[in-house]
Amino acid sequence: MAADACSGHNLELPTFSNATQKKMREFLSPESATANPVDMIASGGPEEYEKVLNIVSKDKNIDSLLAISVTPPTLVDPGAVLEKINKVADTIDKPTLTVVMGKDVTEGKDKAEASVKHGTYQFPEAPAKALATMLKYAQWREKPEGKISNYKINKKDAEKILGKNFKDKKYLSDTDVVKVLRAYGLNCVASRTTRTHLETADIAEKLGFPVVLKAFAKKLVHKSDIGGVEVDLRNRGEVIEAYYSIKQKVDEHAPGTFQGVRVQKMVQDAKEVILGMTKVPLFGKLIMFGLGGIFVEIIKDVQFRPAPLTDLDTEEMITSIKGYPILKGARGEKGVNIDIIKESMIRLSQLVCDFDNILAIDINPFMVSAHAESSLLVDARILVGPTDIK
Ligand code: ADP
Ligand code: MG
């Protein structure tokens, strides 16, 4: 069970070298197994535990030990076995965990002190998980720290909007959101608010078809949920039709809130990713990255790292999402420009580090294409508020 649990956690149980096995053979009964795991059969007592652990701990393929003393009825006293295991554990510098089954050695006068010194468990799966976690932690500590680089940004422009104390939480207006993001070099799609069908058609013509129309209404958050987003509109007729369709949807959903629409150029040949920031107690500002679009809440293919982000953070976050192959280009589809995603993540990290009154940012989607210039943010929200909200 322990061996299965170990391999389930991707821990290897290498076969002991011939020399190691030979040393064990010298005193173990012939029925014993010595390859790994070692099975000393029921006759293995405290002395055998001590000897075997000393031998296998010297095998160069072994990084940690898991000693298991099995269930009663048994010929040996598990307390005495545990004492020997701990004795070996004290002298070697490889993590040594123990399982003592069938007897609670953590209670009573029975070796309470010895049992807590090194990890002692009642069942074989838990120490396998503990070893795997120790390994993960060690690997994390050995990782290079990475570099924090800063892009040239235009902090003054953002300060005009963010350089004050907000007494209450609120979302910035869409125009302010775009100004702040552009000040930090984030590429936002051209967007105009219009209030009549004719004005909408004129603006669409000016921007160039195809365009996208989005509902602009008080308190409306998820526009597509109510049918408030119409994409790929190719001429004035389609734009005017979409304008009224959106107006009708908003009127049905929340009468009296319709203020107009936003007209945007349609971004083509792009994949949708999400970028964001959220403040979390203990960790502070966490930057989020993942596959974007309207299904992001359902798919939840996202990664978080604390700001400020390093070059290694961005690399890891992007390559570790499940949808990474989609971004790289799968099944004959062209990949997107990964560098512009990394750059945008760093710029976002710079922004949230510069302004503590930003409580949350949600950019969904950032439409990334094969080229940096044509990769554009098309929908973003910024929540601001008092800085003492952690
Ligand atoms: P919401 O998130 O409020 O529903 P979005 O502005 O994110 O609204 O739009 C929803 C979806 O519409 C996006 O995920 C994207 O697929 C598409 N979309 C929005 N704006 C554009 C655009 N300018 N170009 C291309 N597709 C867009
Ligand atoms: Mg959106």
Image: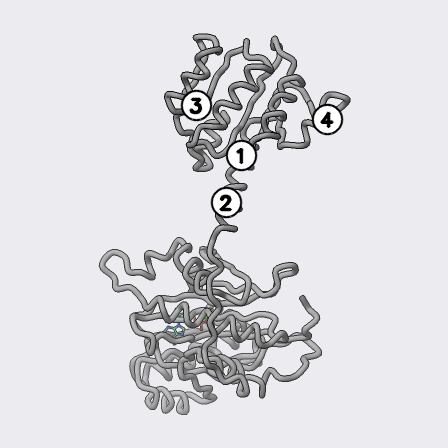
Q: Nearer the viewer, residue 280 or 74?
A: 74
* Direction left: furthest residue: 332
From the viewer's perspective, is 211 left or right of 101?
left
* Badge 3 element: loop
Alpha-carbon distance for marks 4 and 3?
A: 29 Å
Q: Which residue is mark 4?
A: 112
Q: Nearer the viewer, residue 348 or 272?
A: 348
Label 4 or label 2, whichever comes before in sequence order: 4
Label 4 or label 3, whichever comes before in sequence order: 3
Q: Amino acid at mark 1?
A: Lys
In the image, residue 377 lies at what x, y percent?
42, 75
Q: Is residue 258 above or below residue 206?
A: above
Q: Amino acid at mark 4?
A: Ala
Label 3 or label 1, whichever comes before in sequence order: 3
Label 1 or label 2, whichever comes before in sequence order: 1
Q: Are marks 4 and 3 in contact (CB under 8 Å)?
A: no
Q: Nearer the viewer, residue 236 or 120?
A: 120
Q: Which mark is residue 94?
A: 1
Alpha-carbon distance for marks 4 and 2?
A: 29 Å
* Mark 1 nearby-residue class (10 Å; few <14, some 14–19, many ≥20): some
Quadrant housing the C terminus = bottom right
Q: Which residue is mark 2?
A: 136
